[in-house]
Amino acid sequence: MVKVVFDTDLDETTIRVDDNKVVVVPDEEIEALESYSAPVEDDTHYVATKERWFRHVETGAVWKAFNHVSETRSAPVSESFVSGPAFDAKFTTVNVNDDSLELTLADAEITSAIDNKVGKPSEFFTNVPVEHFSKSGFENAKAFNEAHADSKYRVTTKKRYAESTGHPIVQETTLELPYPKLPYAEQNVTTTPSYGAHQIFLGFDQTDVSSENLSVYTQYFNDLQYSGRLQIQAHYKLTLEDNRVIEGDHTFYSTVADRQEVPDYMDNIGNINSQEWTFSPITVQGFYGKFVVTAGVFTQ
């Protein structure tokens, strides 16, 4: 702010001129500067800004000024984060690209426990390493997790000046983060078959797979079905009207078991008093999950 002093202000009581300098009583000189360079902080000192208010006694006019003061820093500290001395796994991520696994830091905001500074990893760390793995080197995500249960991901923070009390140096600090666990689902599920005419609908698309695992299950089941690898072993027990019992086994290649494919069924179709069909479990699996699915017993 620029203050203009007019001749009428020079009352020789509150403002006067001494040696061509404007003096504010009590004898505090105000010097006009062509330019100003604030002190620069360094590893031993930080710059504090202190404000001061001035008032012209005669007129009551006030204005604010400030000065920069070089203060000694408090003792250096090591970086740490609100989540604890070691990162929580939630701050790490694994990007999945085809057969490649890339382990790096998640692009999520984190908070320093030193001065509550909030920022992305790039603001805290010198270089964020990316570690590469091949999915084909592991049977599944569970095997990856087990192989790296004790592995550590190391990353080093940047040296910086904290904004907390004393403005200490936050030293370069190497942190060891636990490897994140890849998502992996394991579940035993059952279905409830239904029927229409000669078909038994096994209900593999109507399972009790949990909602958080449903998309993984659906992906792997569709892959199994449309690749032609789906095989469902069935055992049947047909009780005829003359009380004779015929038992046998048959393999179906679809989620719809068409009993017309079974000779014993077709040969006795008009003479069956009751029937029972049981199905062996099938395994639906991929890198991120394994589901053992069993169709319920079908009776008619």
Image (spheres, rainbow, N blue to C red):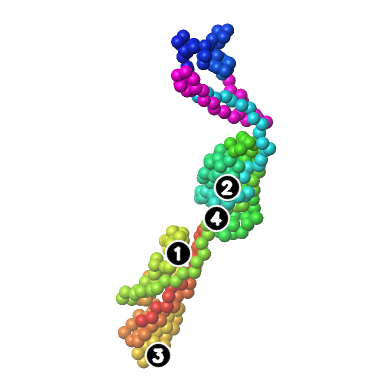
Residue 29: give x, y in percent of width and height.
Answer: 57, 15
Task: Give the numbered dot on residue 182.
Answer: 4
Q: Residue furthest bottom?
A: 242
> Which residue in the protein does label 1 denote?
210
Q: Residue furthest front?
A: 13
SS class, disc 1: loop
Q: Residue furthest top?
A: 19
Residue 188 location in percent, x, y? 49, 69
- Regarding residue 116, the answer to whether it shows in the image is yes
Distance Cα–Cα, label 2 vs label 3: 74 Å
Residue occupying image coordinates x 47% and y 74%: 280
Q: Residue at x 59, y 59 (%)?
A: 143
Tell me if label 1 and label 2 are in contact, CB under 8 Å: no
Disc 2 marks which amino acid?
A: Val
Q: Which residues are magenta?
A: 37-63
**Image quadrant of residue 169?**
top right
Residue 294 x, y percent position in the rendering: 46, 72
Give neighbour class at mark 2: few <14, some 14-19, many 20+ (Cα, 10 Å).
Answer: some
